[in-house]
Amino acid sequence: MQVGSGGALFVLMALLGSLGLWVAVPVLWVYIAAQLQHLIGSGGAALAIGLVGFILTIGLVIRMLEGLSRTIGRLREARGLPSRGPVPLEGILVVSAGLALLAFLVWFFLLSGAQPIPVG
């Protein structure tokens, strides 16, 4: 089986959809908000700017993912294969969200040292 440009675009979509959405974008905006807090001296303003920037950046990444998904569909149709529509993108987002949630839960309950349910 040969992996062509559609396969490369699928891998790019998977990386952008998982690592981009759940790691890179949040870390970027936490860093920017921290720098803004030091610069302007207001935690609330830095948090508000970080939140708005985060939401706008997520919207941009989602639009890029939609474009990649459409391109993959066009490449499949050009080869005579049926287009799957948004199914690959939806699958990537659902699986990556599930993995992100699982990673958070492992960190919170096992690695953070927090005691989420007071025992005594």
Image (cartoon, helix red, strand yellow):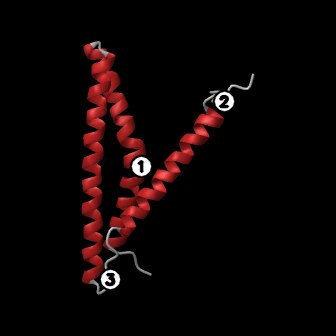
Closer to us: 67 or 120: 120
Q: Which residue is mark 3?
A: 82
- Residue ID at (37%, 71%): 7
Mark in the foreground, 2 or 3: 2
Do the numbered discs 2 and 3 sit on residues whose CB atoms are within 8 Å?
no
| Residue 117: quarter of image | top right
Question: Could you tell me how far apart the alpha carbons at marks 1 and 3 are, in whole angstroms?
Answer: 28 Å
Q: Nearer the viewer, residue 60 or 7?
A: 60
Query: Residue 19 got which mark?
Result: 1
Neighbourhood count class around disc 1 (C-alpha, 10 Å): few under 14, some 14–19, many 20 upward = some
Q: Which residue is mark 2?
A: 117
* 78 with respect to 111 (left or right): left
Graded by Cα atoms within 10 Å as few (under 14), some (14 to 19) or many (20 or more), the crowding at tag 2 reads few
Query: Which residue is painted at 27% across and 20% down in the image?
Result: 45
Residue at (65, 27) in percent of width and height: 115
Instruction: Give how far apart the Cα atoms at labels 2 and 1 are.
Output: 30 Å
Which of discs 1 and 3 lies nearer the camera? The answer is: 3
Decide which of tag 1 and tag 3 comes sooner along the chain: 1
Q: Earlier in the sequence, mark 2 or mark 3?
A: 3
Percent position of residue 83, x then y: 31, 78
Residue at x-position 32% and y-position 25%: 47
Image-quadrant location for residue 81? bottom left
Quarter of the image with the N terminus is bottom left
The residue most toward the bottom is 80
The percent coordinates of residue 16 (x first, y second) are 36, 53
In the rendered structure, which amino acid carries the disc numbered 1? Leu
Q: Amino acid at mark 2?
A: Ile
Q: Quadrant of residue 88?
A: bottom left
7 to 119, vertically: above or below:
below
